[in-house]
Amino acid sequence: MKKDQFDRSERARVHREMFWHNVMREFLTGLSVTAMSGNGALEAAAGTRSDATTDEPQSTPSLFDGRLGVITSSGTRIPIAGVYPLFACGIQGTEAERALSMDVECTIFQIHTPEGEVYTLPLHEIVGFHAVGEEAMDKINSAAEEHSDTDGEPFGFAAFTSLAKQAKGLNEPEAGHAGTPQG
């Protein structure tokens, strides 16, 4: 294999890995926000929660009962009862300090299981996402898109555009994004 083909292949691998990390970051951050909001809007839209205005018991399980889970690089499935980013906000300071905080923002998550175990995982250790039932996953994705602040963009599009913006020019970072692939 020629050097330029190797470089191109390596660059593609790096971009795919960064894209995957950005998609998982979006997904886990979204689940965290849903869990902390307490209003259950995503669960209600996904059909996993009964209407909060009725006294009827839940007819279907909760979104956070372990039906969703991550797959680690060791092949372990970790069911999700709760998920929290360890560092979810940027910091003020010098340009270098802001860039560093943006680089690590929402890259490590603490995942609580229904059994009470707690896992702290960096994004690069998460190689898959598992949902019990394709229909539930489709409904969750649809609901996430409906409640997203993006205008009709498919799930994961922000992860892609952040890579495209980075490729356009690391020397011209957007305000507040300081050249980070997480955008």
Image: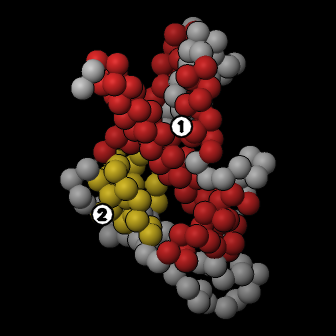
Instruction: Indicate the position of residue 37 as horizontal and vertical percent values.
Output: 65, 58
Horizontal placement of 4 versus 132: left or right? left
State the image quarter where residue 78 is shown: bottom left
**Vertical placement of 103 versus 106: above or below?**
above
| Quarter of the image where the N terminus is located | top left
Mark with earlier residue (1, 2) = 2
Badge 2, how many Cα within 10 Å: few under 14, some, many 20+? Answer: some
Instruction: Indicate the position of residue 51 as horizontal and vertical percent values.
Output: 72, 81
**Vertical placement of 90 versus 141: above or below?**
above
Horizontal placement of 86 versus 157: left or right? left
What residue is at 71 percent from the left and 49 percent from the top?
153
State the image quarter where residue 125 is shown: top left
The residue pinned by badge 2 equals 77
Q: Secondary structure at mark 2?
A: strand
**Vertical placement of 137 versus 147: above or below?**
below
What residue is at 32 percent from the left and 70 percent from the top?
115
